[in-house]
Image (cartoon, rainbow, N blue to C red):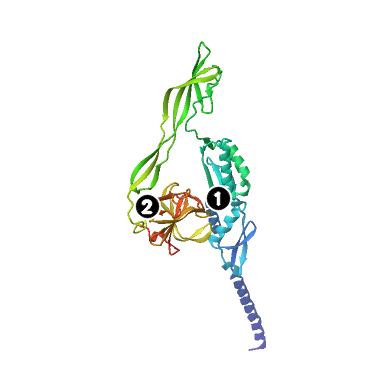
Amino acid sequence: MSLKGKNRIFPAVICILLAAAAVLMIASVCSVRVGLRLFIDGVDIGVVESASAVRSVEQRVRADLPALAYGSDTAVCRITYGYAEGAEVRNVLTDDEIYKAIYIASLKEHTAAYGIYANGAFVAANTDPSVIADAVTAVRIAAQGAEGSEVELTGTLEVRSLYYPVSVLRAGTEITQLLLEGSGELYRTVDAGRSSIIAVDVEANEDEPKSFGPGGGQIVSSETEEDGAITVSVKVTETVPYTTEYRRNEDLFIGSYEKSQDGADGKKEVIYRIRYENGIPVSREIVSEEIVFAPLPKIIDEGTKTRSSAAAGSGYEWPIKRSYTLTDTFGGRTVFGKYSYHYAIDIAVPGGTPIYAANGGVVTKAERSSSYGYYCMIKHDNGQETLYAHMRSEPFVSVGERVYQGQQIGEVGMTGYATGYHLHFEIRIDGEKVDPLKYLP
């Protein structure tokens, strides 16, 4: 080949090599993985699969927040994105990690606290439940007055454990004042005898309102006698207290009681005729009584079933004897975006539902804790133990007491770490928590 021919080949080869190098460079650049980096309120959280995946998790958080936090003013966190390249793209955040980050950012102005509600209306919150309890006690003492009269709750007081805005936290004295000022009368004096003295404005004339006292009584008629005495007929609405009835129940053991119906006071209209001499009431008589609606008796079922000689049954019975929903089972779960292990079953039923001993034994614990709330533990004759948590109030049994299978030991509530009414039920064998569903019928 001539030198001239060789000179034409070399430029062609160089062009081919340069083109191949360009293709390799382009391929190399295109092979670099590019991902999406998540920022929440300007904080770098990590790499995510896609913006749509983040939106899906955010919607879950927004749906869950109302049940976990007070009010609708949870913060709207600012979500932005950047780009990530190379090896970082392989470390993609899981949905649980994204959930936790959005959840925390949404509650950045909130804190875990206890809120008190009077007649269903929120009053205030404090991080210490004892402060709430002291405030309620102060309101009760104020209602009792200097005489220390016996009083009873007329409205409803409820304490809920949620996340509350820092702005609604109040000191104990403030909570007491708010309860006294803004919730109406929460307590009333217990007066079983009912006062026989009725205060009537005997100077009232036909042009003035015919009413008297806080009970809304109404002057029906009045007349003045020759000696100057005044006789007034007054119609008053009075409460008819409910009674408590005990009913035999062959399904309950002797010594066991179960409330089957709450009592409710009735109302009646009574007309009194009162005679006044020199403005002083000297006689009073009932002219008529009419029941507006009858009181509803409180009914308590009393057990008549004879206990067997054996303290414990041959196996476990369900601690709830009505329809229920299992809201959580034994095993792994994700709560608030965090994985944990649940060593019990959660049996959801209405508040106040009776709780029964799943087997006979001796009560070893009957107390309250921050997580379990009011709870009870029973050690059975076979050495195993059962635990019943989130009771409405103190257990009906005490430490050292022997209970029998099927005996009522408390009522379902939501004390402690609970977001709804349910029974947290555990079975322990040699101190180890096991799946209750493997032992229940």
Q: Are marks 2 and 1 in contact (CB under 8 Å)?
A: no
Residue 241 location, x and y as percent? 44, 34
User: Residue flagged by tag 2: what amino acid is it?
Assistant: Gly
Is residue 298 among the parts visible in the rendering?
yes
Quarter-wise, where is residue 43 in the image?
bottom right
Residue at the extreme top: 226
Element under disc 2: loop
Q: Residues within 10 Å of mark 2 (few under 14, many from 20)?
A: many
| Residue receiving disc 2 | 406
Q: Residues within 10 Å of mark 1 (few under 14, many from 20)?
A: many
Closer to the camera in the image, 251 or 371? 251
Element under disc 1: strand
User: Residue flagged by tag 1: what amino acid is it?
Assistant: Leu
Closer to the camera in the image, 404 or 320? 404
Q: Residue at x 61, y 77 (%)?
A: 20
Q: Which mark is residue 162?
A: 1
Closer to the camera in the image, 262 or 254? 254
Residue at the extreme bottom: 1
